[in-house]
Structures are given as C-alpha cells and as structure tokens.
C-alpha cells in the first residue's frame, strides 16, 4: 500500500477543518484543563496532552508531587556547561521517551532565556548568558526530543529574563540587542532544531505583551524564520481575544479558556475577529498533531514510571560533563587508600538537591545524597563526618520521606484520601512514600470529587538531631498536625490569619523530640 503523501495529509486537515463548526474550532484554541487540548468527539478529534518541563517529563502533577516518577536530568545551566550538542541531543531523546511514558506529545521545554539579570529566578532552567551557546544547545535538545514524536515549545518568547513583576514588566530592548542576543537562541531552535512549538512570555516587549505582538509571532517567527508550528501561551498569561488572535497566538493554556475558546467564537460572531484567523490557528495545531501522529494514541493511555538503566547513564554522563574544575592544586583525585576521615560540610550534603523548583520540579525515579554516595563508595574503613553548617531555606522545609517510616516499615508517609471533607468512611485512594509536602491543585485520583476531598498522612518521624524541635504547619485550606495523637497545631479550629497579620507565629507550636519517634 502506498504511503500517504504530504499533500494527502494537507487535504485531510483541510477536510477536517471544513467539517468543524465555529464553536468547535474556537474550543480548540484553549485548553480543556491544565495539560490537555479539547476533544471534538463528533469528528473523532482526541485531546493532546502536554507536560513540564526542562529537565524531565513529570506528567499531570504540579511541582513533582504526584505518584508518577520521572528521569531527572541536570538543569539547563548544567547542560549548557557541557558544550556538547551531541550529548544534549541524547538528553533530549531520553526526555522525549519519558514524555511518551507520561502519555504526552508536547514537552514544555527548552527554556531559552538568557542569564542577564540577578532577578532571573529561573536562570537555572536556562542554558547560558551566551546566545549562540544557548541556541546551539537548544537546537540539539529539540532534535532529540522531537525525534521521539514529541513536540517542544521553546520558551519564553522573548526577553523574559527576570521574575520581578512577571505579569506586567516591560522589557525595553533596542533592535540590535534584541536580534543579536534575545532572539538568536529562539531563531536557532527554529531553524536548526525545527521546533514545532513556541511558548510566549508573560512580559511586555517594548510596550506590547509578547502574546499580542504581531511583530514577534507573525513577522519575525513565521515570515522571517519560516516557523511552521504552533504558538502557546505560558500558563495564565494571555489577556486579550482580538489582539492575541490576530497577532498569531494559537493556544491559550490552561483551560477552560478566558480569552480564547467561547469568547473567541463570540468575537467572530460580533464581527470583531475574522474567522479566517481561527481557521489559521486550528490548521497550525492540527498540522503539528498530524506530524506527531498524536491522534493515533490510545484513548485510555495512562502515565507510567519506567526507570531505565540507559537513561540513568545519559543523566550521569550529562552531570559529569557539566562540572568544570577551574583549578586543581594536586588535591584531586583523592587517594582512597590514604583516606581515613572525611569531612562533608554544607546544608545539601545530606539531601539530594538535584533540581530547581516550579516548572522544573518533579518526583525523580531515585535520589542519592552526597553523604549516602560517599559512604557507599568509601565503605566502613573511612569515617565520614557531616556538619550542616547553615540553613539555606527561605521557607519552612518539608520533612524528607527518608526521615519517616510508614506503618508497614516503608519509607515516607502513608496518605489516605477520602471523598468527603471530614475523613469519614473508607479511603477512596491511598498513596505511599510521600514527604510532608502534600499539595494538590485538583483531585489526585479519579474517585475523588473535585468539589471537595480530604486526606490524612501518617508516619513515624525519627529526628536526626537531639534537642528542641519546632514544627510549623503551612496550609492552604484547613489542616492540623498531630504528634503521638495529640493536636499540636490546629489549623482547622484556628486557621492562620489573613495577610495583614504575621502568620508564622500562629502556625508554629513547639514540641520536644530527643531521637524519639513521633506519629
């Protein structure tokens, strides 16, 4: 049988587009939920799922708090430090495969903003301060990911290099600087990498919001660079209907839509927006879904966690190549035969600080702390002394799962979820191995109602330090902390006050623990 040609695919898309109603087309311009595009069952059009992020495909859960685990690659700044496009392409390939295990066809990466400001809170996601290095690295990453049938969304387009007032800040950049620095990484991601997606930035560029800039999205991106993919907003960033649509924005995320979707259909009927713009939006997205073969995925495809040794090997190689030794006075390499006592100093020595936060946070397949790794490597013949030295947290740290023992003797809290607000009846879902950071932006299981559910975490805490301990409860909604069955912080009867009063003092109670377990 003869393989379908490009003309055949084009014709299929045009036929499908002609069959869709205005409301159906407009619905496709906005997400159905946090991660998926809408379905149009009448014509058999399936949802396409996307996932964060730059150093791993974490799936549905936000901030790495779900049950699914993922391969954690070194952060963007580390990957840039390898100066190795061939290696980065293999990293991309691993993350493309990981995205497929999360039933996703779009990976929200790479992050191509530059290290230009100390206020760049997401600098760790970005490759470099150098636009050429960033662009060549990005192109390799894109080729690797998309070689696995997963689209990338190079972000955040453009000049999104500081987090200060991220939704309103105006990046004022002259033409030459814009072209030679800020735009170049994205240009290379498109021209050399072939990126099928671009994500717009929150900020304004020279007075115009990036998601409303026809100069960026149409003139530069599509007409000058020949970009053939789709343009998606950063989450909750679009703010207009007519301007964003006519500028060349295709998809507003997440859903349900605020400015696209139903409102876009209403704007067309009111004569404010030409329906041809909506057709162009949908055509571009359908073309990408077709190139990926996304519509052929199983309808009931579930997230899976597959920890492959070959993926570990690529992550380890990338981490090794990212390390740069500026000077060696003869101390390294250490002579293991001569070692008798080693001091390991610092707050991250006994914890695996292997990633940044936000869109890059995920639940890794495994964690190994430097302290654990050295003890295993050096053996019992070498004494390892650890001192924390200081605390680096700006907020109350969570209790690590490794400090918690479950009722069955496992690591981490056992969590029970109830389909009501008072923990009554039988749990509808259970989860194990969790630390004390329990945060859900929606029901963590299909048997839990979106209107309201409750959960209870139980475990035995064994302090690693003698002395007086302070327990602090940070809550959204109602919560309470019990130690040995006694309520020590009651955020149900006495919830924290509003922003006008100091909350920390009302959230904290003191309890003693001298290497005794608490439950």
Image (spheres, grey):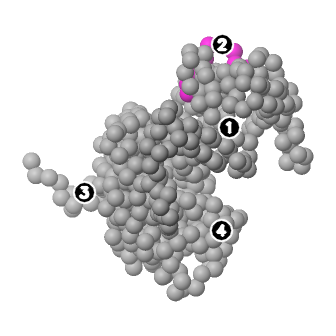
- Residue that carries the numbered disc 4 in the rendered image: 118
* Percent of width and height locating residue 98: 39, 44
Quadrant hosting residue 136:
bottom left
Q: Which residue lies furthest to the top in this view?
A: 425
- Looking at the rendered image, the disc whose residue lies closer to the viewer, 3 or 2, is 2
Quadrant hosting residue 9:
bottom left
Q: Main secondary structure of the magenta part?
A: loop
Q: Residues within 10 Å of mark 4 (few under 14, many from 20)?
A: few
Q: What stretch is highlighted in magenta?
A: 420-433
- Residue that carries the numbered disc 1 in the rendered image: 398
In the image, which disc is placed on residue 9? 3
- Looking at the rendered image, the disc whose residue lies closer to the viewer, 4 or 3, is 4
Along the viewing direction, whichever of 128 and 274 lies nearer the viewer? 128
Q: Residue furthest front?
A: 338
Residue positioned 40% across, 49% down in the render: 315
* Percent of width and height locating residue 352: 56, 43
Position of residue 158 relative to residue 362, above or below, is below
Does the magenta portion include 432?
yes
């Amino acid at each position: 049988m003869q393989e379908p040609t490009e003309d055949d695919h084009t014709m299929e898309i045009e036929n499908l587009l002609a069959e869709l109603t205005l409301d159906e087309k407009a619905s496709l311009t906005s997400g159905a939920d946090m991660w998926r595009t809408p379905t149009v069952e009448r014509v058999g059009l399936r949802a396409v799922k996307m996932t964060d992020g730059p150093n791993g495909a974490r799936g549905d859960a936000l901030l790495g708090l779900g049950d699914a685990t993922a391969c954690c690659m070194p952060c963007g700044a580390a990957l840039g430090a390898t100066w190795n496009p061939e290696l980065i392409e293999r990293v991309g390939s691993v993350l493309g495969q990981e995205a497929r295990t999360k039933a996703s066809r779009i990976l929200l990466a790479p992050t191509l903003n530059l290290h230009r400001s100390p206020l760049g809170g997401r600098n760790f996601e970005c490759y470099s301060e150098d636009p050429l290095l960033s662009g060549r690295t990005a192109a390799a990453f894109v080729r690797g990911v998309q070689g696995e049938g997963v689209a990338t969304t190079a972000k955040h387009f453009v000049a999104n290099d500081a987090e200060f007032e991220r939704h309103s800040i105006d990046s004022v950049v002259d033409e030459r600087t814009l072209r030679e620095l800020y735009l170049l990484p994205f240009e290379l991601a498109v021209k050399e990498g072939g990126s099928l997606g671009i994500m717009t930035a929150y900020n304004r560029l020279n007075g115009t919001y990036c998601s409303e800039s026809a100069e960026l999205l149409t003139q530069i991106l599509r007409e000058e660079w020949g970009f053939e993919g789709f343009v998606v907003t950063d989450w909750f960033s679009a703010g207009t209907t007519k301007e964003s649509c006519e500028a060349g924005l295709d998809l507003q995320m997440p859903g349900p839509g605020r400015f696209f979707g139903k409102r876009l259909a209403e704007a067309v009927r009111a004569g404010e927006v030409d329906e041809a713009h909506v057709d162009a939006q949908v055509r571009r997205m359908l073309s990408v879904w077709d190139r990926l073969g996304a519509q052929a995925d199983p309808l009931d495809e579930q997230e899976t966690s597959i920890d492959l040794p070959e993926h570990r090997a690529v992550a380890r190689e990338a981490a090794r190549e990212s390390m740069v030794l500026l000077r060696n006075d003869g101390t390294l390499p250490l002579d293991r035969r001569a070692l008798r006592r080693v001091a390991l100093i610092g707050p991250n020595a006994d914890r695996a600080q292997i990633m940044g936060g936000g869109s890059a946070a995920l639940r890794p397949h495994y964690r190994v702390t430097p302290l654990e790794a050295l003890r295993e490597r050096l053996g019992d013949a070498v004494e390892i002394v650890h001192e924390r030295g200081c605390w680096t947290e700006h907020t109350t740290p969570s209790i690590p799962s490794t400090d918690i023992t479950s009722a069955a003797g496992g690591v981490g809290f056992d969590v029970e979820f109830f389909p009501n607000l008072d923990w009554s009846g039988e749990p509808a879902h259970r989860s194990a191995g969790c630390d004390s950071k329990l945060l859900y932006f929606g029901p963590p299981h299909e048997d839990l109602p979106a209107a309201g559910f409750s959960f209870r975490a139980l475990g035995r805490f064994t302090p690693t330090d003698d002395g007086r301990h302070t327990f602090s409860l940070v809550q959204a909604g109602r919560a309470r902390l019990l130690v040995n069955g006694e309520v020590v912080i009651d955020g149900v009867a006495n919830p924290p006050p509003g922003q006008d009063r100091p909350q920390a003092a009302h959230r904290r109670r003191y309890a003693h623990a001298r290497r005794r377990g608490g439950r």
